Image (tube, rainbow, N blue to C red):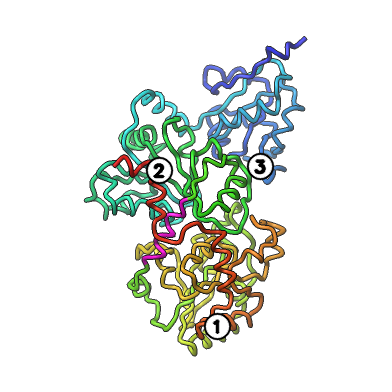
Amino acid sequence: MIDREMSVMTLSKLTDENIDSLSGKKICCVEKAVSYLEELCRKYDVLQQISCIADTNNRNLGQFVFHGQQIEIVHISYLINMNLQETAIVITSDYYKEVFENIVAVLGTYNPDITIYYFANRETEYEEFYRAKYAGVPLENMIVFRSGPHASSYVKGMDFGDNARALFEYALQIGLNRTYELVWLVKDPEDYNRYASVEHLCFLAYDWSVSEKRTERDAYYRALCLAKYFFFTDAYGFARNCRKDQIRVQLWHGCGFKTRVNFVRCEKRYEYTTVISDLYADIHADIYGLKKDQVLVTGYAKQDWLFHARKEDILKLKIPDAQKYIFWLPTFRSTERKLAQLNEYVLESETGLPIVSTRKQLEALDMFLAEKDIVLIVKLHPFQNRNEVFCEGCRNIHLVENEDLVEEDIPINRLLGQADALISDYSSVAVDFMLLDRPIAFMLEDVEEYEKSRGFVFDNIREWLPGTEIFTFEDVFEFVKEVSAGQDLTAQKRRLLKEKMHCFNDDQSCRRILEALGILTSM
């Protein structure tokens, strides 16, 4: 008879010494991660033993074909039904400690003493070595910055941008590098040689986490193991095993309208995140699974750029001179690499744009803009496939791609400071732009479908959109006409919403972030 009170599950690393304990057993991997499965099967040749994968993400459930073998992905709750005498559980995830806690929560104490294994991929092996090496070594006055999504979704320029870059530029402006060593994790450090003369600043490649060169690994893991602070926008898995005295701050990249696709509690994945208001503090605590005291109401670092627009940015991009500029930032509808976790849907349009969907309409809009001496600047999303967007032959519709901004070193929020009006859809850029108190319009041709699929953080979303609603091509013309005439018909609604959605209306967000963390007081 099993003593339920004494029953204990233990977590053990899968090694050459204990791999034989899996012999003759089925294997249930926990968490779908193709890179981990590749390394696991390459190192231990256990593909034929893998019977299923248990996962917490409902979007992953179903059949998965891996090296010709069909593997069923089940919900993690299915573990309770398994014969754990015949099946070994192997965690295949960066967050193996969290996954182990989830397994314990599912299986409880109603099982005999069993060992749950975790497979350490090459990066985890290296990190465990360096964490042990630096255990007990005092942290250094060092701040690590990283921006952009996971390395597998790399787009040039996104590794040095957004809120992280805005905060970094402010740090240099106030001379923080005289007190702290500033470290950037990027794709290619040589892209940033222009900063070579700046003292106490270095750029490291995030790929050095698995470099074959010891000197590169040493540099990377010294920063990872000894930095006091980490600032990042989006990807945070690289800092998953930080010490309790290291502070990780998710700067994120927007307080917007869209809800989170896959819920994962982030309470233990970073210490703080920044938002722009008390309203968004509640929203982000909920959708990211955070405690209220982990959410800092400071404003977003990149919002400071809005107040420092430069006319020369327009000239650098060879945008025609005009009386007024309207910026249009459509949320991307398809991608060149088909990034399923980001893609909303594929837009069926001759132009690759919503509402202005035919070339005839595009030509008519171009002529109307010329008549009003307005240039419409269409800024594509970094993941947007340029080949799917048609603007050739237009004189007053100017396409700006991510590569253009990277080449000229222009942050998008600084460029937006030149806009007399903005056209958006559900992007957080519209919330940022509210701070300039200028007209905004929203393309809403798919609002009902979007609400059913992706969803919004607000009920009755149209009540929360601070601007003109555009459903038809004629609505586009009307908005351009209003901007040309200096009319701002939704100003009252926008200003009322701004009071709810923003706590600050200045260029001091970077300062507030550093003050909230006590960094400025240590200078």
State whether residue 463 is above or below residue 523: below
In percent of width and height, residue 86 lies at 72, 21
- The secondary element bearing badge 3 is classed as loop
Q: CA distance from mark 2 to mark 1?
A: 48 Å
Give the position of the N terminus as an image quadrant.
Answer: top right
Residue visible at 51% across and 29% down?
A: 120
Give the labeled residue for mark 3.
57
Tell me which amino acid carries mark 1: Glu
Residue farthest along the top direction in this orientation: 1
Q: Residues within 10 Å of mark 2 (few under 14, many from 20)?
A: many
Q: Is residue 113 visible?
A: yes
Can residue 353 be seen in this snapshot? no
Nearest-to-viewer mark from 3 and 1: 1
Closer to the chain start, of discs 2 and 3, is 3
* Residue 412 horizontal/vertical position (percent): 43, 64
Q: Where residue 306 appears, x then y in whole percent?
A: 42, 64
The part of the chain drawn in magenta is 298-308
x%, y% of residue 446?
A: 68, 67
Q: Which mark is residue 482?
A: 1
Magenta stretch: includes residue 346: no
Report helix, strand or loop for mark 1: helix
For residue 206, the mark is 2
Marks 2 and 3 sit apart, C-alpha to C-alpha, by: 27 Å
Q: Residue at left 60%, top 84%?
A: 360
Compared with 352, 139 (above or below) is above
Task: Pick whichever, 127 or 494, lies toward us.
Answer: 494
**Viewer-proximal residue, 493 or 300?**
493
Query: Which mark is nearer the camera, 2 or 3?
Result: 3
